Amino acid sequence: MKPKSASLIAACILLCANPASAHRIDEYLQATILSLDADRVQASMRLIPGILVSPSVIAGIDGNGDGAFSENEKRAYAQRVLGDLSITIDGISVQPVLVSWSFPEPAQMREGLGEIHIEFTAKLPSGGRDRSLMLANHHLNRTSVYLVNALVPQDRSIQILAQRRNEQQSVYELDYRQAGAVDAGSRVSAWLSAIQFSSLFHLGMRHIAEGTDHLLFLLVLLLPAPLLVSGVRWGAPSGVRPSLLRILSIVTAFTIGHSITLSLAAFNAITVPSRLVEVLIAVSIFVSALHAFRPIFPGKEAWIAAFFGLIHGLAFAATLDRLGLGRWDRVAGILAFNLGIETMQLLVVTAILPSLMLLSRTHVYPLLRIGGAVFAGFASVGWMIQRLFQVETPVDAIVNAFARHALLIAVNLLVVSLVCRLLLTSRTQPTA
Amino acid sequence: MRKLLVVTAAISLSVTLPSIAQQTATTARIVSAADAFLASLDATQRKSVLYDFNDNEQRARWSNFPTGVVPRGGINFRQMSAPQREAAMKLLATVLSPMGLEKVEQIRQADDDFKANGSKRGPGGRGPNGPPPGNPNGQPPPFPGPGGPGGRGGRGGPGGGDLFGSDLYYISFLGKPSTTSPWMLQFGGHHLALNITIAGSKGVLTPTLTGAQPAAFQMNGKTVRPLGRESDKALALLQSLDEKQRKQAVLNYSVRDLVLGPGQDGKKIAPEGLKASEMNARQQAMLLELIAEWAGILNETSAATRMVEMKADLNETWFAWSGPITGEAGSNITAYYRIQGPHLVIEYAPQNDEPANHVHTIYRDPTNDYGRALTMQ
């Protein structure tokens, strides 16, 4: 019990023939709960005068002293309470606007029972990322006790960092972080994290790295890219520039192709049975293996890459589909996933490109080209059988064994090509 | 592989089935006790205890105030015959745990003590005559009209007192007792509001209010503290904290009342204090023990389910304290404390007229007040 003078206790004995139990006695409780939005703060206040303070509160409301609260008197009192508040955001003062109010009967209040309810809202001007809201309540400070709390914000971009109060809670400060509103960068990052951009990006990378059939198709298609056609066979290496351009155009065409179908399929614009897609992918590898062996569509590699890219895109879409993203999230999802695929693809091509360029200038290149073509040919046939007839073949195991050591193979290939390029004479004459 | 599956399924079934069966059996017992009570009533009584399950006004008609001040729905013990009272107590004994039943009984006894002896230390120092009676039918209009003759003082005087007393506790139902479809049992009066939602095998106690004044009194030569363990266990937890933990747990401002008392359903305030993830295993166990003082009011099967949830939420559960940090077990604290988690709000708020002898507490699940998470389809 707060130190109370004997006279107060005496007054209470006189006044309270009524039980004071469970009632506030000599305090005016003002409890506020704040609800924070991106651009405004809403508050609901409960004002509960104790028995001993209620006469003065009643007198404060009942302006004309007729013993009843008129609508005008209620509104005026609610407005006065708001006037006794001071609200600032980042040090700038903002004005509370009255939303609603309700009052108990004076008799109820005289018993120390009734609750006055006041709701208000205040617009918050936009500001920085880290913000501070201050609420100071000066209403009848001498007799009042306060409670102030903030609801956990509904808006997930708002994060409460700290709450500070003075001992009576008549001054309350709320520090919070607001992603968005003003800081476009953090809003984008919040959105990106909401749609799991980075995880989809990684999924795309993993998909191409582990989806050996996609890579095999592309790599085998690249095998003859540095070469010129000589009749019905592959001939001498072309110049560095045209070779690089051709490789670039093949990779780009493949990307464009699978991006188109990935987007279409992800929006359910087209649906192709996944088994058919898988078989067609195996066919695409077989075709590119044939082409690596003997030129069947020289100069049209980019078109072939684009065409089969369409089919590979359908397979990517199936992966994305399983994630069940919303419509607009899907656009960003496709972008993230595709970027992941491209990045991984680019890494692989960059890793293998120097070896191709170097080796293609030596006599051993046909070994790699034909070896690669035969390997891809067998693998594709295996996959075709597997996917058509749904039987197990050792192809997956073999290809995966190679894929597991992809980095090692790539490094070895580079070393071998460097050695060969240095030791062996460059070839200018067409060979088989 | 298939064998493994079968074995796993068998094990998980044999673990879960008995507990489901146990919960279903508990509900069946509660429903039969409720039906027995309802059968003991006459038609008029039955009509006044049964509310529609969707009656949200009755759902929220509870308070810390005496029933003469804030009337409750349903009928009270005074309006029941001896066999009816017996059936009501049997229902409570089935729904609640022995510990919960004892707590309810002690809260009612405190009300009798208050009626008999008044507040010993509070302002007003009311003598044995204590509170004035309302009108004798048990549901007085709580407030005299403005300027009514004699006002408050005029009604004073010695007598039975219809504001307080262990017989002024009310029982009501929302929906018909059922083992399948959801229904509610409410029991409460001054300083007590049990809101129990039963949906199939599940039972939910939130929101529930307990309180007491006096919070310590003599009965048959023994000291009774209806909410004594709530005080002692919290104090022990606070005193087990090291300097750094205590700094986080103890708020530097005063909290003069419940923040989420009656009427503040479903509100989730920003938590403060010390996170249980910063506590050691012993302190975490103490915190769970403290929560069990509320969760354990309900029968064992429902309480066990609730405690599993509390344990799972532990790392996201906060403990905050405001007020004196000294004290000793056996005498009530004068400090406020709050426990808050993803599915929990507990507040213990000493009242300022006599802080150590008058306390209100609230127990909520802001995500599941009145079992809404179970009953909303």
Image: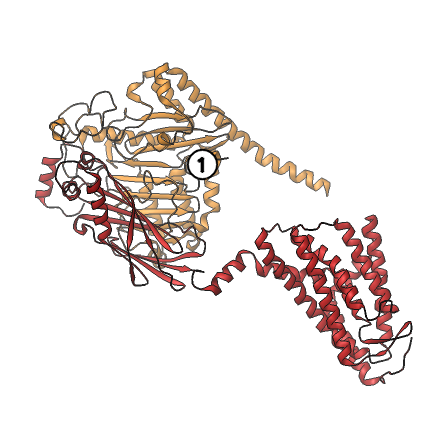
Chain colours: A red, B orange
| Towards the viewer: A6 or A136 | A136
B175 to B237, vertically: above or below: above
For residue B355, say whether it is visible: no
Q: Residue furthest top?
A: B42
Q: Which of these two is toward me, A52 or B205?
A: A52
- Dividing the picture into quadrants, the one containing residue B229 is top left
Q: Residue at x 80, y 54 (%)?
A: A279
B216 relative to A305, above or below: above
Q: Is residue A272 visible?
A: yes
The image position of residue B79, as x and y in percent, is: 29, 19
Q: Quadrant of residue B244?
A: bottom left
Say which element carries label 1: helix
The vertical placement of A355 against B76, above or below, is below
x, y (%) of residue B3? 72, 40
Q: Quadrant of the N terminus of chain B?
A: top right
x and y percent of residue B184 in the render? Answer: 42, 29
| Label 1 chain ID | B
Residue drawn at the location 20% of the way across and 42% of the way down: A72
Q: Is residue A163 left or right of residue B316?
A: left
Report which quarter residue B112 is drawn in. Answer: top left
The residue identified by callout 1 is: B372
Which residue shows up at 77% across the image and 54% down it? A278
> Which is nearer the eye, B312 or B344?
B344
Q: Where is residue A374 drawn, in percent x and y?
A: 87, 65
- Amino acid type shown at disc 1: Arg
